[in-house]
Amino acid sequence: MSAKIIGIGTALPEKIVTNHDLSNLMDTNDEWITSRTGIKQRHFVTNQNTSDLATIAAKQAISDAKLSPQDIDVIIVCTFTPDNFTPSVASMVQKNLGLTHNMMAFDVNGACSGFLIGLEIALGLLNTHKNCLLIGAEVISKMLDFTDRSTAILFGDGAGAVVLTADKSREFNIINRAYPDIDSVLYANGINGDNEKQTIKMNGSEVFRFAVKALSEGIQAMDYESCDLIIPHQANSRIISNVSRSLKIPIEKFYMNLDQVGNTSAASIVIALKQAITEGKLKPKDKVLCVGFGAGLTMGSALFEL
């Protein structure tokens, strides 16, 4: 599949929640969280929704691509935390951008693998469309149970967006896989008869095992020795370190920013990609391998040249 990322943007809420802040809400502390996850802080919204963060990231990506919003003819938003069941977040972003021309706009729910699933869809649509705005956006703080310290410490809010255009000089190698979550080890409940609050539930040890396996397989499915940097889903530094050791890949080849933002699910990879570029760890023509896993259970990986 041939395409090029020509613009990238991100959005993080202003409110920073440190591990110390969480210790005021539950039985935990900075040392306990950091040693188990590598996370030091995360961003939470105060009065914003997923569509707000998605719109901010979208505008930044379009500007970075040196395009007008009118040049976009596909909007895909990857999220499991939409503002509403309908309209889609993508349709709300379309409205916020003031777009009324003929175009497609829809959401994809792939949880933490969402961006990679959306990326494969976008690459296919570029056969018949010119410019695709692909966004990963989540407001997970509204779905956290702060009595569950094993889960609530992990997540943050944020959005990342890229503009993709067809380009025969840039090849994407991409895979996505789904495996039935037979034992319900990772889920967030939806509408049900007893009106239970919608929160994330996770069997941490089982998810850890799946994550290590999924990231390892996703990396090995690609020519990882040729890439300049690996950007994994930013879920837990211990998962990434485990994969680094088992595959004998230097940990320095893995980019991590989860200490600053936590797990932002579908936004995670794009936020990390943007930060790696800003820090000079990636430059034009570099090859990057993005790999993730998520609820479903799902996994995906993509190798491409910037």
Image (cartoon, grey):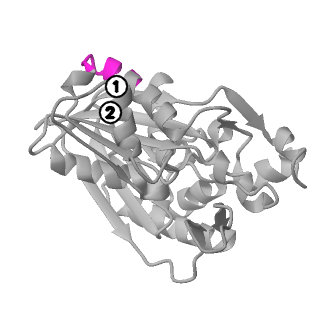
Q: Quadrant of residue 197?
A: bottom right
**Mark 1: secondary structure:** loop
Relative vertical location of residue 167 with respect to residue 66 in this rendering, above or below: below
Which amino acid, by three-letter code, is at mark 1?
Leu
**Mark 2 to mark 1: distance in Å?**
5 Å
Q: Secondary structure at mark 2?
A: helix
Q: Quadrant of the C terminus?
A: top left
- Picture disc at residue 190: none
Q: In this view of the protein, which residue sits in the foreground, 20 or 278? A: 20
Residue 64 inside the magenta-drawn segment: yes
Q: Observer-nearest residue: 180 or 172?
A: 180
- Is residue 276 placed above or below 113 in the rendered structure? above
Residue 97: give its label: 1
Residue ID for mark 2: 94
In the rendered structure, the answer to whether residue 159 lies left or right of residue 40 reads left
Tell whether 219 sits left or right of 149.
Answer: left
Of 180 and 252, which appears nearest the observer?
180
Q: Position of residue 38 (x, y in %)?
A: 70, 47
Q: Residue at x 51, y 40 (%)?
A: 50
Is disc 1 surrounded by few (<14), some (14 to 19) or many (20+) residues within 10 Å? some
Residue 245 image point, x, y percent = 57, 60
Q: Which residues are magenta?
A: 60-68
